[in-house]
Image: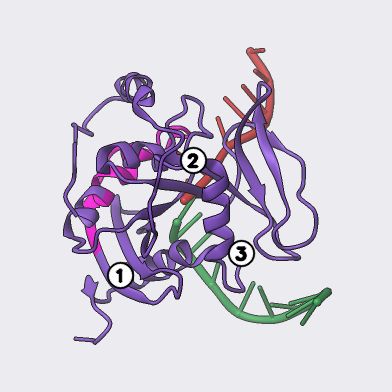
Chain colours: A purple, B red, C green
Amino acid sequence: MKIQETHSFDLTPAEAVRLQEVLRARVRLSGDTGEISLMAGADASYTKGSNEIYAVAVALRYPDLTVVERVSARTTTSFPYIPGLLTFREGPALIEAFGRLQSEPDVIFFDGQGIAHPRGLGIASHMGVLLDRPTVGVAKSLLVGTAADPGPARGSASPVRRDGETIGMAVRTKAGTKPVYVSVGHRIALAQAVDLVLATTRGYRLPEPTRQAHLFANEVRRGGRQTTLPGGE
DNA sequence: GCGACAG
DNA sequence: ATCTTGTCGC
């Protein structure tokens, strides 16, 4: 898909923070996704000692969740992992991967936070602005804010709050497992984001777009194909 | 100053 | 995120 906008990722942590403070103003916390027929999941995998990062984007048909396209990209980074600045580590690889994606997903799931971030610009929101597409943050743990533990039943949810503001939802996607933290990335409402996460969860804690991206990212890092379409080769 | 801290 | 075998539980 076409990258709508970009900027240098070669920044110092201090410069990165300033950029986030500027871009946060462009995040849209609502929007009409229209009829959803195609979704995508994105994730990154790293190599132990090296600074190699493998990013992938997996497109799935909705609501059947059949994988229709998988692309990947590899980059080398010197930017360290700093809580709150994850995008400056994985962003370049993710942008490269999405640039190779032929599909035009109606909504994209990212591994990490949306607006539930110190400066309201987690990786899902940041990428949403650059791609100008609806995005959702699906994180496995919280970066900021607090949430009561959701009820034990799948589908239960409790708001993630920060200063009395609801910035996301802790969602029980599967009984007996820890909840996932869903937050708006860009151009979508929280309620719809939560509905989509639940609608795409199939027996595992993580929704399929995210889970498939996770699996493919590891597959690629270990030395598999870098792009595949359902038919093989 | 002391912890907390997406992936 | 990554390094790793077996093991407890549904």
In terms of secondary structure, where does tag 1 sit? helix
Report the Cα–Cα distance between label 2 and label 3: 19 Å
Whether the magenta-drawn stretch holds residue A74 is answered as yes
In terms of secondary structure, where does tag 3 sit? loop
Q: Residue type at mark 1: give it.
A: Val
Badge 3 crowding class, 10 Å Cα cut-off, few under 14, some 14 to 19, many 20 or more, is many
Q: Horizontally, is A209 left or right of A102 in the view?
A: right
Which chain does the residue under circle 2 lie in? A
**For the residues carrying marks 3 and 1, which lies nearer the camera in this image?**
3
Query: Which quarter of the rendering shows the C terminus of chain A?
Result: bottom left
Q: Residue type at mark 3: give it.
A: Arg
Residue A215: image location, x then y, percent: 42, 70
> Which comes before the other along the chain, label 2 or label 3?
2
Task: Find disc 3 in the rendering and name its residue.
Answer: A205
> Which comes before the other along the chain, label 3 or label 1?
3
In terms of secondary structure, where does tag 2 sit? strand
Give a yes or no on whether discs 3 and 1 share a subunit: yes
Task: Find disc 1 in the rendering and name its residue.
Answer: A220
What's the magenta region?
A: A72-94
Residue A47, picture quadrant: bottom left
Report the Cα–Cα distance between label 2 and label 1: 28 Å
Q: Is residue A210 visible?
A: yes
Badge 1 crowding class, 10 Å Cα cut-off, few under 14, some 14 to 19, many 20 or more, is many
Q: Residue type at mark 2: give it.
A: Val
Proximity of marks 2 and 1: CB atoms separated by less than 8 Å: no
Task: Find disc 2 in the rendering and name its residue.
Answer: A184
Task: Name the one closer to the observer, A124 or C4.
Answer: A124
Report the Cα–Cα distance between label 3 and label 1: 22 Å
Q: Horizontally, is A77 left or right of A153 in the view?
A: left
**For the residues carrying marks 2 and 3, which lies nearer the camera in this image?**
2
Q: Residue at x 80, y 59 (%)?
A: A152
Q: Is residue A139 visible?
A: no
